[in-house]
């Protein structure tokens, strides 16, 4: 499933990026993927995704 349509970021990639960044933060995860927040519509779901990622790290 896509988390961020603007950057075409998938849930599994955002989770992995948050783990790699060591932070449960959508901005850090997106930066890890070479992307950045544009419209911001994805942020509530992205926060859920990365907070799930941090508990499973
Ligand atoms: S959907 Fe993620 S920045 Fe627009």
Image: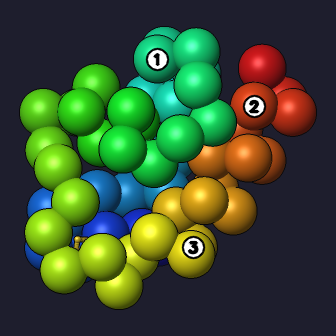
Picture quadrant where residue 33 is located: top left
- Say whether marks 3 and 2 touch (CB < 8 Å): no
Residue denoted by label 1: 21
Q: Is residue 25 above or below residue 45?
A: above
Is label 2's Cβ within 8 Å of ligand 1?
Answer: no
Picture quadrant where residue 29 is located: top left
Report the colour scheme: rainbow
For residue 49, which numbered disc appears in the image? none
What is the CA distance from the residue labelled 1 to the residue labelled 3? 18 Å
Residue occupying the point 28% across, 26% down? 32
Q: Residues within 10 Å of mark 1 (few under 14, many from 20)?
A: some
Position in image of residue 16 (x %, y %)? 51, 30
Picture quadrant where residue 22 is located: top right
What is the CA distance from the residue labelled 3 to the residue labelled 2? 14 Å
- Pick whichever of labels 2 and 1 is earlier in the sequence: 1
Residue occupying the point 62% across, 46% down? 50
Position in image of residue 8 (x %, y %)? 19, 64
The reply to whether residue 15 is in sight is no
Residue denoted by label 3: 45
- Pick whichever of labels 3 and 2 is earlier in the sequence: 3
User: Which quadrant would the C terminus be assigned to in this image?
Assistant: top right
What is the CA distance from the residue labelled 2 to the residue labelled 1? 10 Å
- Pick whichever of labels 1 and 3 is earlier in the sequence: 1
For residue 54, which numbered disc appears in the image? 2
**At numbered mark 3, what does the secondary structure look like: helix, strand or loop?**
helix
Position in image of residue 26 (x %, y %)? 45, 48
**At numbered mark 2, what does the secondary structure look like: helix, strand or loop?**
helix
Q: Is residue 7 above or below residue 32?
A: below
Residue 13 falls left or right of residue 48:
left
């Amino acid at each position: 499933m896509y988390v961020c349509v603007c950057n075409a970021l998938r849930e599994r990639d955002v989770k992995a990026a948050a783990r790699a960044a060591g932070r449960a933060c959508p901005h850090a995860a997106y930066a890890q993927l070479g992307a950045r927040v544009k419209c911001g519509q994805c942020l509530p779901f992205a926060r859920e995704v990365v907070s799930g990622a941090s508990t499973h790290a």
